[in-house]
C-alpha cells in the first residue's frame, strides 16, 4: 500500500479518517500497511496528509450549526440538556 | 420551562446491563393512574409547557390508556415525545392518528446483534431494529412531521460499533443520533467493570465519533453531551474542533425541564428519583411537591426547586464535585445538579473524571485541571 492509497482513504473513508487521527499506526495496520517499513519519504507525505485532513475537518466544523435544548434529550445523569449539531445546507 | 418529563412506569420488559432505572424494573412501584396523567397534562398546559416526554421503564410496557392520553395532549396542543425500546410496535402504531405524537426516541445500543444484545439481551437487536425500519417507513408515508431519534448509550460493550452506528443510522433514515455517555448508576453501577471499561478506550471511541461526524457530514443531527473540560482535552490531544459539541449548561433541571415521578411528585430533574440514589423522601407523594394537588408554578416556589435552581445558577456545588473542584471551567459550568441531592451518589462527574484519570496516568500537561494536592495521594 502506498501513500497514494492512504490519501484516497483519507479523502473517502470517514471511518479510516477517524481511526487514523486517533491512532495512526493501528489504523494503518488495520488497513494492511506496516508503518514500521514505510520509507521516510512516504512518512513525510503522510504527515502532510494528516495536516490536510485536519484542515478539512476544521473547514467542515464551520458548517455545523447548533440547536440547544430541543424536545429531544437523553436521561443519562447530567446529559439532559442536549446540544444538537447538524450540517447546515 | 420547555419540557415536562413524565416517568410513566418503572417496569420494563428488558434488563439492560447499563440501565439507570435499576431495581425499578423488577420491583416497579405504583404508577400514576390515567386520570392523574390527564391532570398532569392540564397542569402542563396551564404552565405553557411545549413538550411532554414519556420515560420509563418502558412506556409501551405499561397498562396506561395511551390513546386517551395522546388524544388529550392533542386537544391541549401539547407535543409529545416518547423514549422506547420499540419492542411493542403495535402500541406505538395506535398513536399515529394523534398529531400530539411528534418525536420517537428509540434505543439502539449497537450496529449488530453482538454488541446491542450484549447490553439489551438476546434477540433484542433484531426486534428493535426491525420495528425501527417499519416505523421509519410508516412515518415517511403517513406522518412526515414526526421526528425519529436513535439513542446509543456508549459503553465498553459497544464502543467498537461507534462508527458503524453512523452507517446504520444513515441506512435507516433517522433524524438525530443521540450518543449517551453511560453513567455508572443503577445496573451500570452493578456491572460497572463491564459497562464502563477502561478510560482510554472509551474516550478514543468518543473522539472517533466527532471525527467521523465532521468527515462524513451525515444528513442527520448528532447530539453528544460534552462538558467543556472534556472538549478542551479532545481538542488539545486530537486537534478536533469541539466548539459546537461543547455544553456548559448540561443541567437543564428547573429551567429547561422538570420531571414527574411515579408518585406524582414534581421534581427538578429525572436524576432524583430512580431506585439507585433515590432520596427516601421520594418514596411517597410529598404534599408540597404533588403535581396532582398543586399547580406547577406553586411547586416551583418550593424550597427544593429554589435550592436546586440556585445551585445550578451559581455553580456552587461544583466545589464539592470531582474534578469540578479543580477545573478551570468551574465558575461557568453547570453539570448534573441532581447528583448532589442523591443519597449515596458519587460526588463526581464521570466523563470529566475519566479524562482527569487519563491525564494523571499519562503525565500529560493539561492546564484545565489544577494539580491535586500531593498529600491526597499518600
Ligand atoms: C431508561 S431508558 C427508558 C426508555 C426505554 N425503555 C428505552 O430503553 O429506550 C431511556 C434511555 O436512557 C438510556 N440509559 C439507561 N441507563 C443509562 C445509563 N446508565 N447511562 C446513560 N444512559 C442510560 C437508555 O439506553 C435509553 O436510551
Ligand atoms: S434501558 Fe430502557 S429498555 Fe433497557 S432496561 Fe432500562 S428502561 Fe428497559
Ligand atoms: S470538571 Fe465539572 S466544571 Fe469542569 S467541565 Fe467537567 S463538569 Fe464542568
Image: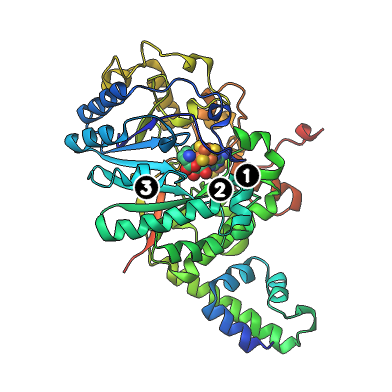
Sequence-first disc among 2 and 3: 3
Mark 1 CB near ligand 3 (8 Å cut):
yes
Q: Quadrant of residue B50?
A: top left
- State if disc 2 and disc 1 touch (CB < 8 Å): yes
Sequence-first disc among 3 and 1: 3
Percent of width and height locating residue B328: 55, 43
| Alpha carbons under labels 2 and 3: distance apart | 31 Å
Dot 1 alpha-carbon crowd within 10 angstroms: few under 14, some 14 to 19, many 20 or more: many
**Left or right position of B82 against B73:** right
Ligand 3 rendered quadrant: top right
Q: Which residue is mark 2?
A: B229
Chain ID for label 1? B
Q: Is residue A13 above or below residue B63?
A: below
Q: Which mark is residue B155?
A: none
Dot 2 alpha-carbon crowd within 10 angstroms: few under 14, some 14 to 19, many 20 or more: many
Q: Which mark is residue B104?
A: 3
**Left or right position of B101 against B30:** left
Q: Is residue B287 above or below residue B375?
A: above
**Secondary-structure class at tag 2:** helix
Q: Is residue B333 visible?
A: no
Percent of width and height locating residue B57: 48, 34
Q: Nearer the viewer, mark 2 or mark 3?
A: 3
Q: Nearer the viewer, mark 1 or mark 2?
A: 2
Q: Which residue is mark 1?
A: B369
Q: Quadrant of residue B46?
A: top left
Amino acid at each position: 500500500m502506498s501513500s497514494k492509497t492512504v490519501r484516497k482513504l483519507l479523502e473517502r473513508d470517514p471511518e479510516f479518517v477517524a481511526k487514523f487521527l486517533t491512532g495512526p499506526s493501528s489504523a494503518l495496520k488495520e488497513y494492511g500497511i506496516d508503518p514500521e517499513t514505510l520509507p521516510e519519504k512516504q512518512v513525510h507525505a503522510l504527515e502532510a496528509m494528516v495536516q490536510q485532513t485536519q484542515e478539512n475537518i476544521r473547514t467542515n466544523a464551520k458548517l455545523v450549526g447548533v440547536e440547544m435544548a430541543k424536545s429531544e434529550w437523553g436521561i443519562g445523569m447530567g446529559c439532559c440538556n442536549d446540544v444538537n449539531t447538524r450540517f447546515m445546507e | 420551562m420547555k419540557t415536562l418529563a413524565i416517568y410513566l412506569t418503572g417496569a420494563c420488559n428488558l434488563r439492560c446491563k447499563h440501565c439507570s432505572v435499576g431495581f425499578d424494573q423488577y420491583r416497579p412501584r405504583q404508577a400514576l393512574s390515567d386520570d392523574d396523567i390527564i391532570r398532569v397534562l392540564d397542569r402542563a398546559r396551564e404552565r405553557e409547557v411545549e413538550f411532554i416526554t414519556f420515560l420509563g421503564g418502558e412506556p409501551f410496557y405499561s397498562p396506561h390508556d395511551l390513546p386517551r392520553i395522546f388524544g388529550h395532549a392533542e386537544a391541549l396542543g401539547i407535543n409529545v415525545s416518547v423514549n422506547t425500546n420499540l419492542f411493542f410496535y403495535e402500541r406505538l402504531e395506535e398513536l399515529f392518528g394523534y398529531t400530539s405524537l411528534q418525536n420517537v426516541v428509540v434505543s439502539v445500543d449497537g450496529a449488530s446483534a453482538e454488541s446491542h444484545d450484549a447490553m439489551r439481551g438476546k434477540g433484542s437487536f433484531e426486534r428493535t431494529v426491525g420495528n425501527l425500519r417499519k416505523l421509519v417507513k410508516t412515518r415517511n408515508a403517513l406522518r412526515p412531521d414526526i421526528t425519529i431519534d436513535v439513542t446509543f448509550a456508549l459503553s465498553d460493550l459497544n464502543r467498537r460499533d461507534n462508527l458503524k452506528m453512523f452507517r446504520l443510522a444513515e441506512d435507516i433514515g433517522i433524524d438525530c443520533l443521540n450518543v449517551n455517555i453511560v453513567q455508572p448508576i443503577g445496573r451500570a453501577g452493578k456491572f460497572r467493570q463491564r459497562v464502563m471499561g477502561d478510560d482510554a478506550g472509551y474516550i478514543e471511541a468518543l473522539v472517533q465519533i466527532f471525527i467521523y461526524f465532521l468527515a462524513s457530514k451525515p444528513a442527520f443531527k448528532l447530539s453528544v453531551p460534552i462538558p467543556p473540560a472534556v472538549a478542551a482535552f479532545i481538542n488539545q490531544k486530537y486537534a478536533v474542533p469541539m466548539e459546537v459539541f461543547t455544553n456548559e449548561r448540561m443541567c437543564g433541571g428547573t429551567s429547561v425541564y422538570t420531571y414527574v415521578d411515579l408518585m406524582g411528585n414534581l421534581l427538578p430533574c429525572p436524576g432524583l428519583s430512580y431506585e439507585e440514589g433515590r432520596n427516601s423522601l421520594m418514596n411517597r407523594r410529598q404534599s408540597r411537591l404533588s403535581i396532582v394537588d398543586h399547580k406547577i408554578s406553586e411547586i416551583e416556589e418550593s424550597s427544593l426547586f429554589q435550592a436546586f435552581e440556585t445551585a445550578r445558577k451559581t455553580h456552587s456545588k461544583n466545589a464539592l464535585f470531582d474534578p469540578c473542584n479543580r477545573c478551570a471551567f468551574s465558575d461557568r459550568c453547570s453539570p448534573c445538579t441532581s447528583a448532589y441531592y442523591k443519597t449515596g451518589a458519587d460526588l463526581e462527574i464521570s466523563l470529566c473524571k475519566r479524562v482527569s484519570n487519563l491525564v494523571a496516568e499519562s503525565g500529560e500537561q493539561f492546564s484545565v485541571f489544577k494539580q491535586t494536592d500531593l498529600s491526597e495521594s499518600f
